């Protein structure tokens, strides 16, 4: 790269205005541009000289206007007070939903010097048309016309008065917003022209000017008091006028109002450039690729070649430096932290020009979690008393936040210092939530669980909708978290906490100031949250570093007037570069266009200029974009496509490269991508242990459906923590029906007499109360009076009622209940691959009863089961039981029947807790009652094994089970994921298997 734009500007100004340099005012777009211009100017001489007055344009305007730029929060309150003069009933909560947008519109109106009277008349008339309903019959009012609409239209009719009154009040205070100050100077240019201490005003590196800026620049130029130095290129100014980068600049040049056109280069048309266009699979990897590209430069070992690869490898970085300046440009500021986290420790020479938004901090997520906890509460009304209850969902969100976890860890360390092991308060509360399925907590319950520790008093003391209580919580939270930050010794987080303390203090001062005023409106918790969020958005942590470091990390706008040898630009995707078509304004698009206000089209043209200007003097450019995938529709930026299809045709010295990104093995753990787990000896040993602990029918079904799922769930015993819900899901609904039936059956069985038809008939009037009793016992925090739970409660009553009615009509009486919700086991000793194997077959059977000569093994299903689900074919029975993934219900009945048959064969009957029931002559039947298919009665299995005796059934069953165990314990057959993708839909482990 030859001279930079700022070096050319400095040389030009020094040469032309050397004699009276101290009387020159130089205005640039940004503070950073000012810094580099000063350096470039200093290089023009080795003699001491008086420096010109060098300022960024916002400072120049504010200084010239002799006014203070008002704080955004103060401006919001001032606008609210002004609106109340027009509408005394305006509510602050609603006001804040559109106030920031209105202030932005006021700012644009002034910056672009719009005739406010005409604009607001236009808007008022547009709203009048909205109210005009010519097809509405006389005397009829549209349903949408509510009592609030008159106030809404009243506000629009008075916007002009609000605008004028706001500016008047600001002028009285000696303050102003940005656009107001620009307009003041543009309308009073004599302030600049009459300043005899200034010989020349020189404006450097501007492009799309607001109307006020245009007026200032052109008037000074015409009077011979001003000069503008442009940074433009022949490519978008003349050669390719379809490029939006040159739209406004071409108009400025052709108008002749800005004086002599300085300058227009031809770098994009003739300079040799290597442009690397790199597609990456996801957003997060962009930061790693960018850092690897820079690392390649440091090592002077260029691994990026045409159709080559970029390998991610951060080993062996040596402390070398290049003399070339490199910029990593982030159009998406959310990538700043990922980028900084990928910086190897050896790279120390870098400078971050972007501020790190406090909204991207962990502190912000904690504050938001506390707002959710205290804002989204449940008000329980019982016995005339109101109790605020906090939701488990937000309690968990707060307690699992990293900062709270860290504090709890430090607290545990202190509590265990005496050698006594204490359970952490966080774990105690989370255990209560998950184990007891507790949905709501009162603050007192949480205080008891945390033994009234001050930190948890701070977190859980109810705010009751009071912003002052929220302030108190934040003050105390800051003091508690200081210990966490000091222990972690993280300078960034300490800075976050310091800035948060300043924000809270600032809001506190504003609230006290407002409260002291007569008829002051109380700040609601919602408004307090909105203010705090706005402060989080505005507040950025500035990084301190060496401005002339070889590596500059910056946002797109911060590149204005700066030039770099190498540019690495991330997020080169549509809707980021440029941003999407968003019209954040209360002024309609057509009105903005008609009156000359900026629209998204203006922003697209501005971004196009910044992009091409960044490329002008760079030798090497890397453009990273995220490729489309099944989960997103990412599209590479139009600017990349313009380079590929247009720029390369105009400049034959441009070479395009398309490297691919490959993650080398030392970046990832060595993961097998065929989704298999080989059965090593330790794994086989663990399987044998699990078989001895208990093999349930559900385990067998899982193994046959997907052996890899069996490995995860029953060998490793991986499981998701059970979700706490506030409504009955399918599992809990089934449990409710089972518990109610168990309660009814147990009550009848305790009479020591067989159940008769009349015993069931007397239960019908009690059903609603019995189901309610079981519901409230099992789910005390669930509301049963309304909503989804109430519907499911009614459904449960109806299902049980229908079941009992079916039993009455089936007339199987008398019925003797032999067991309820009984867990039974059967021991199996066999040899597999020459080794002895012990298996404890286990099953929890809903009900075992005896009617006539039948012993029925019954399983209740609240879902729908049909006869076709239990059909068996004798010749294919073995394949059905040992291989068919859709025969789970048949397998369950088979194993239940096997367990009971083995007990009967061994004990010559069933051995109950208090008696022995001989069953040698009884027929064993296993079946399902499907509560959604009661018309088919008991759906029995049709398995044919042996001669029909329990002993014969057991013998044949164990032959099948041994074959199953041979497959389970075969080291040559790995655990692998199923080929039936339908089975993966509800699987806990589908993400592990990439399904």
Image (spheres, helix red, strand yellow):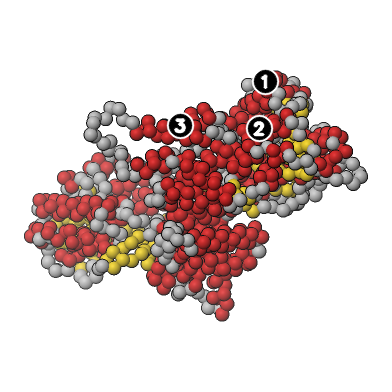
- Viewer-closest of 688 and 314: 314
- Looking at the image, residue 640 lies above or below residue 482: above
- Looking at the image, residue 257 lies above or below residue 39: above
- Viewer-closest of 978 and 879: 978
- Viewer-closest of 48 and 698: 48
Asked whether residue 733 is in view, the answer is: yes
Q: Is residue 620 left or right of residue 278?
A: right
Pointer 3 or 2: first along the chain: 3
Residue 350 position, x and y percent, is 74, 48
Residue 485 position, x and y percent, is 61, 64
Label 3 sits on residue: 122
| Residue ranking furthest to the left | 758
Nearer the observer, disc 1 or disc 2? 2
Quarter of image, res 151: top left
Q: Residue at horizontal 51%, vertical 38%?
A: 584
Residue 929 position, x and y percent, is 21, 50
Q: Quadrant of the N terminus?
A: top right
Distance in Å between CA atoms under marks 1 and 2: 25 Å
Q: Residue at horizontal 20%, vertical 70%?
A: 915
Question: Does dot 1 land on a helix, a strand or a loop?
Answer: loop
Q: Is residue 626 left or right of residue 961?
A: right
Q: Is residue 74 left or right of residue 733?
A: right
Q: Are marks 1 and 3 in contact (CB under 8 Å)?
A: no
Pointer 1 or 2: first along the chain: 2
Q: Residue at horizontal 45%, vertical 31%?
A: 122
Distance in Å between CA atoms under marks 3 and 2: 25 Å
Quarter of image, res 269: top right
Label 2 crowding class (10 Å Cα cut-off): few <14, some 14-19, many 20+?
some
Label 2 sits on residue: 214
Q: Residue at horizontal 39%, vertical 57%?
A: 376
Residue 419 position, x and y percent, is 56, 79
Which label number is shown at residue 240? 1
């Amino acid at each position: 790269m030859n001279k930079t734009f700022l070096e050319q500007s400095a040389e030009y100004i020094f040469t032309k205005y050397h004699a009276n340099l101290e009387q020159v005012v130089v205005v640039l777009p940004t503070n950073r541009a000012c810094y580099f211009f000063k350096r470039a100017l200093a290089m023009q001489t080795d003699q001491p000289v008086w420096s010109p007055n060098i300022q960024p344009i916002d400072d120049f305007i504010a200084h010239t206007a002799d006014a203070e730029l008002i704080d955004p929060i103060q401006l919001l309150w001032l606008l609210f007070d002004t609106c109340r003069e027009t509408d005394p009933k305006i509510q602050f909560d609603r006001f804040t939903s559109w106030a920031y947008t209105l202030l932005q519109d006021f700012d644009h109106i002034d910056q672009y010097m719009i005739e406010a009277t005409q604009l607001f008349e236009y808007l008022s008339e547009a709203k009048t048309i909205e109210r005009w309903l010519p097809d509405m019959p006389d005397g009829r009012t549209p349903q949408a016309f509510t009592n609030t609409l008159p106030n809404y239209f009243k506000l629009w009719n008075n916007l002009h008065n609000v605008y004028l009154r706001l500016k008047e009040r600001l002028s009285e205070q000696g303050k102003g917003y940005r656009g107001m100050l620009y307009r003041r100077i543009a309308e009073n240019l004599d302030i600049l022209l009459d300043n005899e201490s200034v010989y020349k005003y020189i404006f450097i590196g501007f492009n799309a000017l607001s109307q006020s800026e245009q007026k200032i620049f052109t008037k000074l130029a015409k009077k011979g008091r001003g000069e503008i130095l442009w940074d433009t290129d022949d490519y978008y100014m003349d050669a390719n006028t379809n490029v939006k980068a040159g739209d406004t600049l071409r108009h400025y040049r052709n108008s002749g109002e800005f004086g002599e056109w300085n300058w227009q280069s031809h770098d994009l048309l003739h300079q040799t450039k290597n442009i690397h266009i790199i597609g990456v699979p996801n957003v997060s990897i962009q930061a790693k690729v960018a850092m690897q590209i820079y690392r390649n430069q440091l090592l002077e070992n260029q691994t990026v070649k045409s159709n080559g690869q970029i390998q991610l490898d951060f080993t062996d970085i040596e402390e070398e430096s290049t003399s070339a300046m490199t910029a990593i440009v982030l159009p998406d500021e959310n990538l700043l932290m990922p980028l900084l986290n990928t910086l190897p420790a050896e790279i120390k020479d870098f400078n971050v020009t972007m501020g790190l938004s406090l909204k991207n901090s962990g502190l912000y997520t904690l504050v938001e979690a506390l707002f959710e906890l205290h804002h989204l509460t449940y008000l329980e009304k019982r016995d005339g008393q109101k109790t605020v209850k906090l939701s488990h969902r937000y309690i968990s969100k707060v307690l699992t936040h990293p900062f709270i976890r860290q504090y709890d860890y430090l607290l545990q360390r202190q509590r265990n210092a005496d050698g006594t092991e204490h359970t952490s308060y966080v774990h105690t509360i989370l255990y209560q939530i998950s184990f007891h399925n507790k949905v709501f907590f009162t603050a007192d319950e949480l205080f008891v669980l945390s033994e009234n520790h001050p930190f948890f008093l701070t977190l859980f003391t109810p705010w009751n909708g009071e912003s002052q209580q929220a302030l108190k919580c934040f003050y105390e939270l800051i003091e508690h978290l200081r210990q966490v930050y000091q222990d972690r010794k993280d300078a960034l987080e300490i800075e976050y906490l310091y800035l948060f303390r300043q924000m809270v203090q600032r809001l506190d001062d504003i609230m006290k100031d407002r409260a002291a005023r007569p008829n002051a409106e109380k700040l609601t918790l919602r408004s307090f949250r909105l203010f705090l969020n706005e402060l989080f958005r505005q507040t950025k942590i500035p990084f301190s570093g060496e401005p002339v470091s070889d590596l500059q990390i910056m946002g797109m706008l911060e590149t204005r007037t700066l030039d770099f040898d190498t540019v690495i630009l991330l997020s080169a995707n549509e809707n980021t570069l440029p941003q999407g078509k968003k019209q954040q304004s209360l002024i309609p698009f057509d009105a903005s266009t008609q009156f000359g206000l900026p629209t998204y089209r203006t922003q697209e043209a501005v971004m196009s200029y910044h992009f091409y200007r960044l490329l002008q003097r760079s030798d090497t450019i890397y453009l990273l974009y995220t490729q489309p995938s099944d989960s997103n529709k990412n599209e590479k930026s139009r600017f990349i496509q313009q380079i590929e299809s247009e720029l390369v045709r105009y400049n034959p010295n441009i070479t395009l490269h398309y490297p691919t990104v490959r993650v080398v093995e030392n970046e990832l753990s060595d993961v097998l991508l065929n989704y298999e787990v080989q059965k090593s000896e330790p794994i086989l040993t663990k399987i044998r242990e699990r078989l001895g602990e208990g093999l349930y029918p559900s385990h067998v079904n899982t193994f046959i459906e997907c052996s890899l799922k069996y490995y995860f769930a029953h060998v490793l015993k991986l499981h998701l923590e059970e979700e706490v819900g506030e409504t009955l899901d399918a599992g809990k609904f089934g449990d409710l029906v089972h518990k109610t039936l168990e309660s009814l059956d147990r009550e009848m069985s305790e009479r020591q007499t067989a159940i008769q038809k009349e015993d069931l008939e007397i239960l019908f009037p009690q059903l609603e109360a019995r189901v309610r009793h079981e519901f409230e016992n099992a789910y005390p925090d669930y509301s049963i009076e309304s909503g989804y739970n109430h519907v499911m409660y009614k459904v449960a009553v109806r299902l049980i009622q229908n079941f009992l009615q079916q039993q009455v009509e089936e007339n199987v009486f008398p019925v003797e209940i032999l067991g309820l919700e009984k867990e039974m086991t059967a021991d199996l000793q066999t040899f597999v691959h020459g080794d002895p194997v012990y298996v404890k077959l286990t099953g929890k059977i809903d009900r075992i009863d005896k009617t006539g000569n039948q012993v029925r093994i019954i399983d209740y299903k609240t879902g729908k089961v049909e006869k076709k689900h239990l059909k068996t074919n004798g010749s294919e029975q073995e394949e059905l039981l040992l291989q068919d993934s859709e025969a789970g219900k048949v397998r369950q009945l088979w194993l239940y029947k096997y367990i009971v048959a083995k007990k009967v064969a061994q004990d010559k009957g069933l051995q109950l807790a208090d008696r022995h029931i001989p069953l040698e002559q009884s027929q064993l039947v296993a079946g399902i009652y499907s509560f959604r298919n009661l018309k088919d009665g008991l759906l029995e299995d049709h398995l044919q094994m042996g001669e029909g005796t329990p002993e014969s059934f057991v013998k044949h069953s164990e032959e099948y089970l041994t074959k199953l165990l041979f497959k389970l314990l075969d080291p040559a057959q790995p655990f692998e994921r199923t080929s039936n993708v339908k089975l993966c839909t509800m699987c806990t482990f589908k993400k592990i298997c990439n399904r």
